Amino acid sequence: MGNGGEVQMLFRANDAVANLPDRLSEWTTFFAQYSPQDLLSNIWLLISLRPFSTIVMLIVVIALIAFVVWLIMVSQGALVYTAAQVYKSKRVDFASSLAHARPLAGKVFLLNFATRFVLYGLLVLLAIPFTILAVLNDGSGFGLFGIIVLAYIVTVPLAMIMNFILKYALIHVVVQGQAFWPAFVAAWHLF
C-alpha cells in the first residue's frame, strides 16, 4: 500500500469511467474518418518520398523504445533483488543490483508481457459484446452501461489481481531463480 500502486489504480479507474462516454464518442469518430488503409497508404507515401530519413527515424525510435523497455525491466529486477538483500540484512549497492538484474531482463519482460496480455485479452473478450452494442446504438443505452460496469467492477479487481501475480512472480524469478512458467504458477498459488 505504501507506493500506492493498487490504490492508485482505483482512482485512475474512477477517472476513466467518468470520461468513458466522451472517449467512446471520440473513438467512433476517429475510426469513421480514418481507415487502416488510409494509415497504411500514408505510411507508404512517407517511405516513398523520403526513404532514407524515414528508415533512420524508424530505427532511432525503435532503438529508443527498446532501450527504455530494457531499462524498466532491469530496474524492476534490481528493485526486487535489492529488497530481498535488505530483508536478509545484507549490504547491497547500485552496481551489484544492476549486475544481478541485467541477465534477468528477458524473464522480467516475459512476466510483464504475459500478465498484460492475459489482462487485456480478457478485457477485450469481455468488452466486445458491449462495445458492439454501444457503437450500434450511437454510444448510448445498454452497451455503454455494460462498458462502464465492465470497466469499473470487473477491470479494477482483475488488474489488481494481475498486478499482485506479477509482483509475486518477479520475486520468484529474481530471488529464487525460477524459470518463467514455474514462477508464474507459484505466484498464482501464492496469491
Image: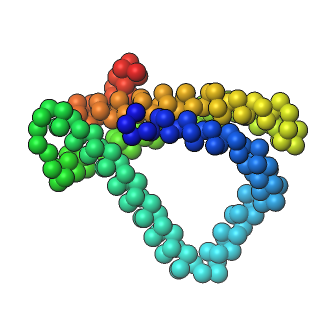
Q: Is residue 28 above or below residue 89?
A: below
- Give whichever of 23, 3 is nearer the camera: 3
Quarter of the N terminus within the rendering = top left
Identify the residue at horizontal 57%, vertical 78% (top origin): 51
Q: Is residue 97 visible?
A: yes
Percent x, y of residue 4: 43, 39
Determine the residue located farthest toward the right in the rendered image. 137
- Give whichever of 92, 34 is nearer the camera: 92
Q: Quadrant of residue 66?
A: bottom left
Q: Quadrant of residue 134?
A: top right
Left or right of 94 in this view: 27:
right
Left or right of 100 in this view: 126:
right
Q: Is residue 136 visible?
A: no
Percent x, y of residue 83: 23, 38
Q: Is residue 179 above or below residue 18?
A: above
Identify the residue at horizontal 51%, vertical 73% (top origin): 57
Quarter of the C terminus within the rendering = top left
Q: Quadrant of residue 48?
A: bottom right
Percent x, y of residue 155: 60, 31
Percent x, y of residue 132: 80, 37
Left or right of 174 in this view: 163:
right
Identify the residue at horizontal 11%, vertical 43% (top origin): 91
Identify the residue at horizontal 40%, vertical 54% (top origin): 69
